[in-house]
Image (tube, rainbow, N blue to C red):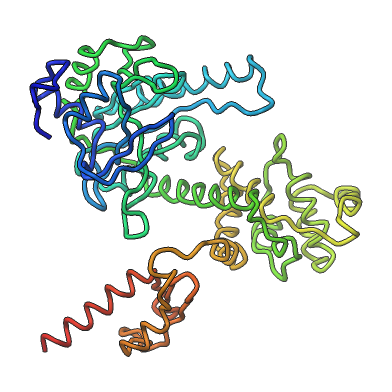
Amino acid sequence: MDINKDFNSFNITEQQLNDFISFNIGKTNFYWEYKNGVPFCMKKQFAFKDLNDHLIGARVFGFSPFIDNETIMFAALDFDAHRDEDDTKETYQAKVVEAQEDAIKVYEYMKAYKLAVVLNSSGSEGRHVRWCCKGAPAANVRLYLQYVLYKLFGDPNKHEIFPKQDKLSEDTPYGNQIKGCLCVHPKHKMRANIMGGKVVLDFHNSLKVMNMALDNLGNVPKFSEEDVKLIKNLDQSHQYIEKYNSDEYVKDLQNIPEYCAFFEEVATKHSLPSDNKYSRHKSLDSNMAGYGITHPKTRIAYAEAQGRTSHTAFDNWPKKWKNGIPQFNCGLIIAYARNHSKKGNKNAHKGLKKCLNCPKFKEFMLSKAEPMGWACSVAISRMAKDYDFENCPKCNSKFIFDDRLGLWKCEKCKVDGRITDFEAIIVEKVNKESSQ
């Protein structure tokens, strides 16, 4: 991006321009422009005149963190206070304070580990922590930011992370954007400049802080494999609960399962915690009331392991069943296990892992997915037949195809993927055959 003196209202040097880009702009062949407060993706080259308009407050732009499809220029955490309908002025203000304090905690934590981070105002009550990690894999960065949220707040999903994808693909060629800093908020008309403590700095001091932060560029954070596994499980269960509690909820998940690994392999053998709304009584006893009808031995073992020897622990729950039909709420069990896993309870985490590996869970997550990209128009089984590629080249087993979603897998080799992955394998096969 060349500096054009005709539009350089702030007399930005080339170094200052590069510093700004390091914390704000990945790809420049597309961007988002905010119109009436809403970002619209513009599929054209971003120019210095556009940046000048952004800085003087005439227009506001958002940018993708990606440099290519897998590596990123920067990452960010968005600390917003979302106003609910029933929020009073006091409860909403408490959310604002919490979001701002969380942002400072994250910034100070990452800064202490010598990472190239800055804290900026969003131009309203919100805050952004930006991390220049030029050339780092998006998947690694996302995982680390989830680790920071888990480490500081016990929840890797408490605040919004950018980028939102581990990589870009033909289904998500643009990814998601986050509003660039040093602009004027389109609604509140306040500058989204860098913070110095709790003070919003002016334009040139904001650039100075960015420049100083880049002295730490290239430092790589480390965390344990055990942390990685826990964070991934918490993240997967969060996605499930989001779907389960949405309009996509399916009644099939209320059916009493033939086998529940959470109850059979964990809750009948290990003591589990009970706290607030995630108590054993509400989350586990309610489900055992239904499950125990067809699994009486499990009910007895569960009652002994959890100290639920009173009959009322189970017998009162049928009063809340619908039309007298036993209920089984997988979402309630997973929410319980996730909550106590966040607090470090190893038994709850054992149960959470059982739930995430349950065929019922996997089927639900898959059944609510929508076909994307080629899957909307190309049958993967037909593609396989046309190219004589219906068997796995490693073990010669038949591939299993899902034409609706464009998915394939080999159960014997434990490999799977989407239609784009399958196309790549076919191309590789064809190229090998043509070169022989």
When the figure is inspected, residue 316 is found, relative to residue 109, above or below; the finding is: below
Residue 49 falls in image quadrant = top left
The N terminus appears in which quarter of the rendering?
top left
When the figure is inspected, residue 9 is found, relative to residue 46, above or below; the finding is: above
Would residue 323 be found to the left or right of residue 138 on screen?
Answer: right
- In x, y percent, where is residue 52? 20, 24
Would residue 271 be found to the left or right of residue 202 on screen?
Answer: right
- In x, y percent, where is residue 275? 70, 36
When the figure is inspected, residue 190 is found, relative to residue 326, above or below; the finding is: above
- Front residue (pair 291, 303): 291
- Residue drawn at (32%, 49%), measured in percent from left and top? 174
- In x, y percent, where is residue 254? 74, 60
When the figure is inspected, residue 397 is found, relative to residue 153, above or below; the finding is: below
- Residue drawn at (40%, 87%), measured in percent from left and top? 397
- Residue drawn at (44%, 36%), measured in percent from left and top? 160
- Front residue (pair 421, 371): 371
- In x, y percent, where is residue 424? 27, 73
The C terminus appears in which quarter of the rendering?
bottom left
- Residue drawn at (47%, 34%), measured in percent from left and top? 159
- Front residue (pair 41, 156): 41
Residue 182 falls in image quadrant = top left
